[in-house]
Image: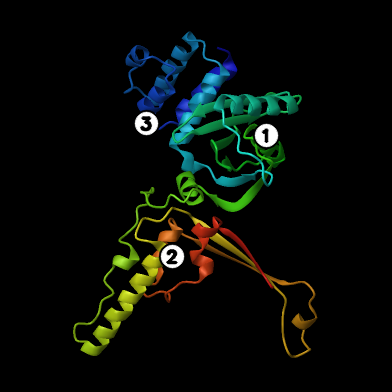
Amino acid sequence: MDEIVAEFIKRTILKIPMAEMMTILKAWDFLSESQLQTINFRKRKESLVHDLVMLCEEKHANVNDAALLDIIYTQFHRHQKVWDVFQMTKEPGEDIDLFDMKQFKSSFKRILQRALKNVSVTFRDAEENAVWIRIAWGTQCKKPNQYKPTYVVYYSQTPYAFISSSRLRSSIPLLGQALTVASKHHRIVKMDFRSRYLDSLKAIVFKQYNQTFETHNATTPLQERNLGLDINMDSRIIHENIIEKDRVQRVTQEIFGDYPQPRLEFAQYKLETKFKSDLNRGILAERKEPLRCLVKFSSPNLLEALKSLAPAGIADAPLSPLLTCIPQKRMNYFKIKDK
């Protein structure tokens, strides 16, 4: 095992929280159970890492072994990445081919390695017929940089791929080409849809809403809080409030359902509109460029927050379709222009 691989493994293990160390190492399945039993996991982390690297050296770990460990760590901490959704399409009338995962991997890797002399590609199969792909990019003159990889999660026999955001934007066209050819599609486009929460993106794209999503440490949902009706209030007003509250709850449930919402952090709206006035005067009336405005809604759980607005009395029901259409349109970047 050379020094580059040893350093790569060392850095990866240092990132792993102690509470997850044994779980991730067992999932890696590179070190045997008997080897792991020789390690004292109560040591200081630096000493523990040294012992683990020594065991990897005894087993002659290579860069692919180290990359697999990094994939597993990333699977456990997928929320540390920002994920973009890409959609692929076939030509109209094109037949659906039988999918072969082995052939997909071979084709994907071959396309990248033909285009780039120095590129490292590692695969790991996951649940639901998914494959995680880790690409470390190099150049014609430089070895792959293992510390700035791109991750791809592709679900076989679907037109969707989830790609971690990368500063190496020049690599995206080549990556898109490899995905479309290997999965036997014709075209790939980036959707206006991104989040740190890969599971939620997947649930929305595949319309799998009715499940439990990762939650944040929040207080009681707004719709469950007591709105504090005064006990001395006129009974007619109380009756009217109950009717309105029932209506709001019904409308909210029709729009959002009665299941937990997929977790997104934001929705962004860009508005472009030309100034319109019946009065032919003023600086804005002569302006040829449209007026531009950007509005961004942020929350630890945006869809749950939107679902809570009307029941809490903060907004009227129903909410604007621009806010409630996010799961249906599968996007959280919107551009609003004049018709």
Pointer 2 residue: 306
Q: Residue at x 64, y 48 (%)?
A: 190
Q: Residue at x 75, y 91 (%)?
A: 279
Q: Earlier in the sequence, mark 1 or mark 2?
A: 1
Direction left: furthest residue? 231
> What separation in Å lies between label 1 and label 2 (alpha carbons)?
40 Å
Where's residue 37, x and y in %? 32, 15
Pointer 3 residue: 20
Would residue 311 be seen by someone viewing this image from the given angle? no
Say above or below: 91 vs 274.
above
Would residue 256 be seen by someone viewing this image from the given angle? yes
Q: Nearer the viewer, mark 1 or mark 3?
A: 1
Amino acid at pointer 2? Leu
Q: Nearer the viewer, residue 317 or 194?
A: 317
> What separation in Å lies between label 1 and label 3 (alpha carbons)?
37 Å
Q: Residue at x 40, y 23 (%)?
A: 25
Q: Earlier in the sequence, mark 1 or mark 3?
A: 3
The quarter holding residue 270 reads: bottom right
Q: Nearer the viewer, residue 291 or 186?
A: 186
Q: Nearer the viewer, residue 268 or 322?
A: 322
Q: Nearer the viewer, mark 1 or mark 2?
A: 1
- Numbered badge on residue 165: none
Q: Earlier in the sequence, mark 2 or mark 3?
A: 3
Amino acid at pointer 1? Val
Where's residue 238, x and y in %? 24, 84
On the rendered structure, is 186 left or right of 241? right
Where's residue 133, x and y in %? 56, 31
Crowding at dot 3, Cα within 10 Å, few <14 / some 14-19 / many 20+, comes out as: few
On the rendered structure, is 62 left or right of 181? left
Q: Residue at x 51, y 27 (%)?
A: 124
Amino acid at pointer 3? Glu
- Numbered badge on residue 181: 1
